[in-house]
Image: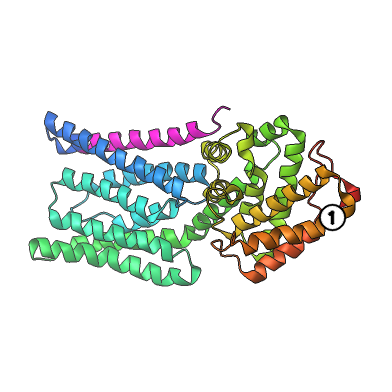
Amino acid sequence: MEQKMPAKRLQHYGIIAVLTVITSLLFAYASNPGADGFIIYLIIDVIFLQIVLYMLESSRLSGKLGDSLAGNYRRIADWYGVFCAVAAGCFFLPEFVCPAAATALFFAMASTAEIAITLGTFLCVLLCMAHGGNFYELAAYVVLILIGAQLAKTMREKQLRFWGCIVLMSVSVCIPVLFYYLSYRKSSFALFCYSFIFGAFFVLLFVLFSERLYGRSDREDSDIYEKIIDEAYPFVVDIKNYSRAEYIRAVKAATVARKCAAEIGANELAAAAAGFYYRLGILEGEPFIENGVRLAEEGCFPAAVISILAEYGGEEKLPSTRESAIVHMVDACMNKIAFYRAQELSASWSPEMVIYQTLNELSAAGTYDESGLSMNQFLKVRELLVHEEIGYDSTNGRRNEGQV
């Protein structure tokens, strides 16, 4: 199968690379370092881009970028462009004047604290090189970046935003003034004014747009789940073309998994999407799990879904989340019911009996011990599955009404 979305990811990588080179060359031109200076700037760019690529990929694979991966890459590239322009503008301002804390704050809102620290530090390094700045200027920026990145984590909670704004305003003024004094053993009223104006401006921006920015991220996280199980989505079409019965089974698994997740307060969308794609590897055959995970990664699926696919059937890894446990339970029951129906032993078994027996055996074997699923939640899911029609005739994809 062809890769569905990696080109978009590469496109955003390319945008970041181009912005990096342009910004560094502008700084190099403004500081007039000579031919060797331009080469040094470009070497720094290469090193930096390698680090950024590594961090983005590791964050993607570990799930730290959040669920809407494609949206996160786009936001990172967009915000990076904005703050490249901010850093370039700071070149024309006095030394120690740079809204580094605010830069890291908004960066972290669009990506992760680690990525925000890396990108923000790089831009401040370029600014200090162009300024011919000393250790104290760079140290001030680094401290501000670290504080801003951490504020982004805590200020997601509404009740902490007021105090977060107080901290942001305080450090935006105090840190530059303090480090300027350490550098020159004198104070600067102009620096105080610049820092106060920048701090107040970005605090105001945060107050005005924080709800929209945080909310947009949450909406995109939800939208990506809905998108990948939409009937028109390429992988959905591929499954339908592969086997009508497999498609119907996937739809049923997604529906039931979503109900189970809602029953215990787990992530409904993650459970539904993972339930639908749990057998994705069947499109390419063995190695089943490896191919399923690879296809999901190529499609920029949410990290939660990819993780559940990697834990398929508990064969290589036991379910590590409640959502993974739910999907595993649904799949196990559907498999066992399909097996009994294929044996045509309707007089000696019932779906309810099969579900109780299957899930009790799995629980006793410790299959869900690492998932965070409590016994009470396990029982709720089990009872819901008992009352759901989860059996399908695997030969033609039609529900066998008489046996449910």
The location of residue 212, given as percent across then percent down, is: 52, 56
- In terms of secondary structure, where does tag 1 sit? loop
The type of colouring in the image is rainbow
Residue occupying the point 17% across, 44% down: 129
Magenta stretch: helix, strand or loop mostly:
helix
Q: Is residue 162 left or right of residue 167?
A: right
Disc 1 target residue: 349
Residue segment shown in magenta: 1-27
Left or right for 44, reference 333: left
Task: Report the quarter where the N terminus lies.
Answer: top right
Q: Amino acid at mark 1?
A: Trp
Residue 316 visible to the viewer: yes
Q: Position of residue 78 (x, y in %)?
A: 42, 43
The one nearer the camera, 72 or 378, is: 378
Please say whether residue 22 is one of the residues in the magenta stretch: yes
Tell me: 403 left or right of 219.
Answer: right
Residue at the left extreme?
A: 185
Q: Is residue 17 magenta?
A: yes
Q: Residues within 10 Å of mark 1 (few under 14, many from 20)?
A: some
x and y percentages locating residue 306 in the rendered image: 54, 46
**Who is closer to the viewer here, 206 or 229?**
229
Give the quarter of the image for residue 168.
bottom left
Frontmost residue, 126 versus 352: 352
- Name the residue: 20% across, 60% down: 191
Total tally of numbered discs in the picture: 1
